[in-house]
Each structure stands twice: as C-alpha cells, then as structure tokens.
Amino acid sequence: MGYLVIRGEKHEQAVLCSKDKTYDMKIADTSNMLLFIPGCKTPEQLKADQASCNVIHSQIAGFSNNYWELRRCRPKLKKLRKLLMEDPYEGPDSRKDQTLTFSKYTTEDLLSLIQASEEEILHQLQVIDACEIEGFWRILEFDYEMKLLNHVTQLIDSESWSLSKVPLRTCLEELGSLEPREMIEHTLLSYGRKYIDDGEVYFEMHEDKICRAIAQMLLQNAVKFNLSEFHEVWQQSVPEGMTTRLDQLKGLALVDKSSRPETIFLLKVEDLPEDNQERFNSLFSIREKWTEEDITPYIQDLCAEKQTVGALLTKYARSSVQNGVKVYNSRRPIS
C-alpha cells in the first residue's frame, strides 16, 4: 500500500514524499469552493453501487478555497553526506569510534532528517558507498578506504588474478587477519561488480572508479599539480593493467588549460552548493568562463526531470564565442 509523508525541519521548506519520489509543495487558490463531506462518494463509486440512487442529505464538515499543488523536484540529498561525514568510520581500532561524541544515524533517523523519499535515500547511500555498521549508516574515512583498497589491489597483483574475476572467498581468507571481513567485502562491492560463477562469488573490478580514487588521493594534498607530472605519477600509482584517462575525473578534478604549464586541481561536485543559483555563482567565482564540456559534470545533478544541461545553461549563464569556442559566463556580477 502506498503512503505520503511530509518531510522537513523547522528551517526547511517542506516537501511531500511518496515511497520513491519527492515533490515541492505550494499553496494554490481555486475559484471553486472545496467542500469536506464525511462519507462522500465519488461518481465512480456511485456507478459501482447502482442500488443507492436516492438523494442523500449530507453534512458539510468544512470548506477551503485553496489546495496543495505538487511539483516533482530533485531530492535534497546533500545533507545526507554532510550528516554521515560528521563521524566517518576510521576502522575497528579507532579510539574516536569508541567515544560517543558524534551522532550516528539509523535508516529511521535519516528518513526523519533528509528531504527525500525512502527509495531515493537508500539509492544515494549506495552511490556514496555508505555501509551499515552495527545498525548505523557510516561513510568510510578516505584514508581508511584507500588502505582497504590497497590491500585488495595488492592481493590481486600478488595472485596474478584477472581484474574481471576476483574471488570473494580467497580475499576474505587472505585479508581477514588484517581488516574485518565485512570491510573487505564492502570494498569489493564499492569498487567492483558482484557475480556468481559455478557457485562461487566473484567481483569484476571497476577500473575507472579505482583510477578515480587514486587520483583523489594524489590531488587532495596539493593546491595545484602540474598536469603532465600528475599524469605520470597517477599512471604509476594505479594497479598494473589499468589505464588512467582524464575523463575518469569528471566532477572530481578540473584542468586549467590557460596556465603554463597546464595544471590540475581537486574540485569535487559534492562540495558545491545544492541550490541552482548558488551552484552557478560558486562555479563562476572559481572560473569566469566555462566550456560546456567542462561545466557539465558540475551541473548535471541539478537537472530536474526531463531537463537538459543546455536548458540550465540558458537560464543561469550567458554564452559567447572565444577563439572559435563557445563559452559560458555568469548572467550577474560575481562578488
């Protein structure tokens, strides 16, 4: 059976959620008075009940001249990562994890705090690679996640396994003494695709995702990195057999082609504002003019249902041609 729930804290604009969709709510006026009649039957119900064709005297319990108008909207999910990043999981030996300084969140807690439907929240938890530990949803602290990934990739290398056929059972047997088995399996699930062959569980590792994570590790401690030097170090750092490409870094890092030599720096889409205008203001304060190719990874998640990146750019940016290339800049002055 379906249900509807209104979600939002005191400072937030309320949204209405079904099991799998989120809607903005706006009060709309109507010239037709809406009457509330207890036990009222619709025309469809009356047709089904042919026996009762008598005129019925009904008591009107109330009336209204307005109603809630619903419009499908993007779920407001940025808060989800923010809450879980208050206390990232640093491993079973972390002293910080043994104190109760920070809040931890169950599924029920997140449903009461996040303005999104249950399905949208659960899907986003998968997208951000959250895992449930002792009943609470946690995000792995990045250095700990890299430590786990390094264990897995070193084992793959030492065993000379194909990246498309990594056996779960052997991984758990070999690495179970170093880290909790559920963390090893979570790492394989985050960076691979699970499948069963001849009764055994295997993982096909995602090359792009592993290369992306290693790039983030290299870039996070540098303000800017010489692009050619970065490419060389990056390729040397990924597991043997993997190939690094700049298109693996969409929404994670940005190349500055105007500097000499060309540089690359970390710019994560999840660190940008969730509001459309604020997002564009932030992007145009980082770079005055953008090509569509460069800006798309940073605004794609703002697209509402059936909306295109082109439509967003038309609304929030002004286009011009620079050296034969179409570029976009802000419609308003950026302070």
Image (tube, grey):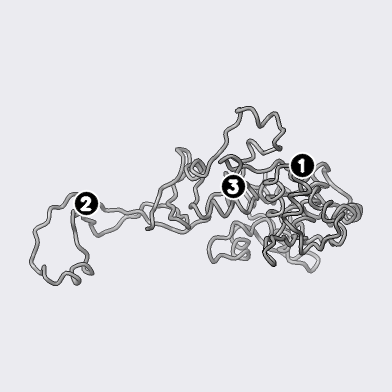
- Foreground tag (1 vs 3): 1
Kind of residue sitting beneath label 1 = Ser
* Quadrant in which the N terminus is drawn: bottom left
Whole-percent x and y of residue 329? 69, 57
Mark with earlier residue (2, 3): 2
Residue topped by disc 1: 177
Residue topped by disc 3: 78
Regarding mark 3 in the picture, which secondary structure is present there? helix
Whole-percent x and y of residue 266? 77, 48
Regarding mark 1 in the picture, which secondary structure is present there? loop
Mark with earlier residue (1, 3): 3
Splitting the image into 4 quarters, where does residue 327 fall? bottom right
Closer to us: 51 or 133: 133
Closer to us: 106 or 31: 106
Query: Residue 63 bears which disc, if any?
Result: 2
- How many residues crowd around disc 3 within 10 Å: few (fewer than 14), some, or many (20 or more)? some
Q: How far apart, in angstroms, are the residues tagged by discs 2 and 1?
A: 68 Å
Kind of residue sitting beneath label 3 = Lys
Q: Compared with residue 305, is residue 183 higher up or lower down, i.e. above or below?
A: above
Whole-percent x and y of residue 199? 67, 64
Regarding mark 2 in the picture, which secondary structure is present there? strand
